Amino acid sequence: MFTTKRVPFTILFPFTWRAVLLFLTYSFLICFLYDVMDWKFLAIPFVPVATIGTAVAFYVGFKNNSSYDRLWEARRIWGSITNASRSWAIMVLDYLSTQQAAHPLTDNELQQIRKDLIYRHLAYITALRVQLRQKPVWELHHNPAHEVVERIEAFRQCSLDQELSRFLPVTEIESLIRHPNPATFLMRQQSAQIRDLRENGLLSDFHHVDLERMLVEFYNQQGACERIKSFPFPRQYAFFSYVFTWLFIFVLPYGLLTEMAKVGNWHVWLTIPFFTIIAWIFNTMEIVGDTSENPFENSINDVPMTAICRNIEIDLRDMLEETDLPKRVQAINNILM
């Protein structure tokens, strides 16, 4: 996501230069035919054109609102994951006890169990992040929002085993990556371990149930992310928004010719700048909706999952009283991932 109030021109340019060049060329050709070649029949009344523009504005607005809802829901989900992660760490640290243990453990052994549970959770959110940033079929197309991210070395995503190597032993990673959904399998391992802890008297029945509820909460939030990721914005809305926008852009200069000709002969050429501005606005509204509909596609409009995961890691490792904590993720070129 962008961290600045205004989007810099270096980001806007890849999105706009082709369209602006097309608008200038198209409007110049129409003005040339109208004024120089004397094709006066090209001018049409502006009222039907304005009616189309109004309808298109409403339709594109609906699409953009729906795209924003998907983006904001994704951010709320990761906010819930952050809160639940902190709750999980507090429960793990406070619930584990050797008072009823079948075999007494040292403080270091108990602390290692706590660390294993918390580090496996950090591996879980990392696996979920990596899975969500994999591109499905409908995202495998030319998109400047992807290209901006891919050009920045720090944003290039490592393989899952490399990402998990900071939290899990190699043997566990090797068995994990063979599963089709590593994040789900990690939650299964968490459940199996806390069940063993209950059987060994390190967790009471009540605390065991409480921790299992937290695992269910993580599954719920993961499912919500996967719902957004696996179900794209309905094509019947996205595609026809694109069609209607370009239909309006196509007929707009013919209506502008009529209005400009009323002012004076040479004013016809003002169709070029006015058409370019209006067409650029409508095209930009369409692009904004397109680039916001999938908040997990590893683009500049993504939910900053890397930064969120790092913040969770810092909080949870600080709860473990570790001192060698990683630094928070910083924005690069005003983009936070």
Image (cartoon, rainbow, N blue to C red):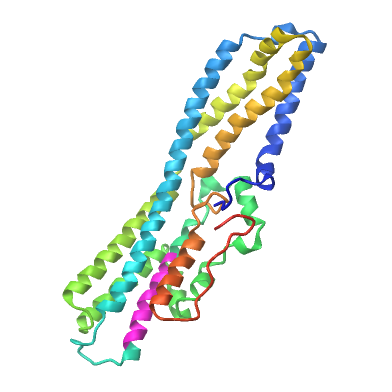
Instruction: Indicate the position of residue 160 as horizontal and vertical percent values.
Output: 51, 67
Q: Is residue 221 magenta?
A: no
Q: Is residue 113 magenta?
A: yes
- Relative placement, left or right, of 180 versus 214 is right
**Residue depicted at 37% across the width and 67% down the height:** 185
- Residue most toward the right? 36
Query: In which quadrant of the rendered view does residue 186 lie?
Result: bottom left
Instruction: Indicate the position of residue 173 as horizontal and vertical percent values.
Output: 46, 75
Instruction: Indicate the position of residue 226 as horizontal and vertical percent values.
Output: 40, 53
Can residue 91 be seen?
Answer: yes
Query: In which quadrant of the rendered view does residue 221 lie?
Result: bottom left
Q: Look at the image and give the residue range highlighted in magenta.
A: 110-125
Q: Main secondary structure of the magenta part?
A: helix
Instruction: Indicate the position of residue 129 as horizontal and vertical percent values.
Output: 47, 61
**Residue depicted at 56% across the width and 34% down the height:** 285
Q: Is residue 242 depicted above or below 328 in this figure?
A: above
Q: Is residue 68 depicted above or below 199 in this figure?
A: above
Figure quadrant of the C terminus: bottom right
**Residue depicted at 74% across the width and 27% down the height:** 24
Can residue 230 be seen?
Answer: no
The count of marks equals 0
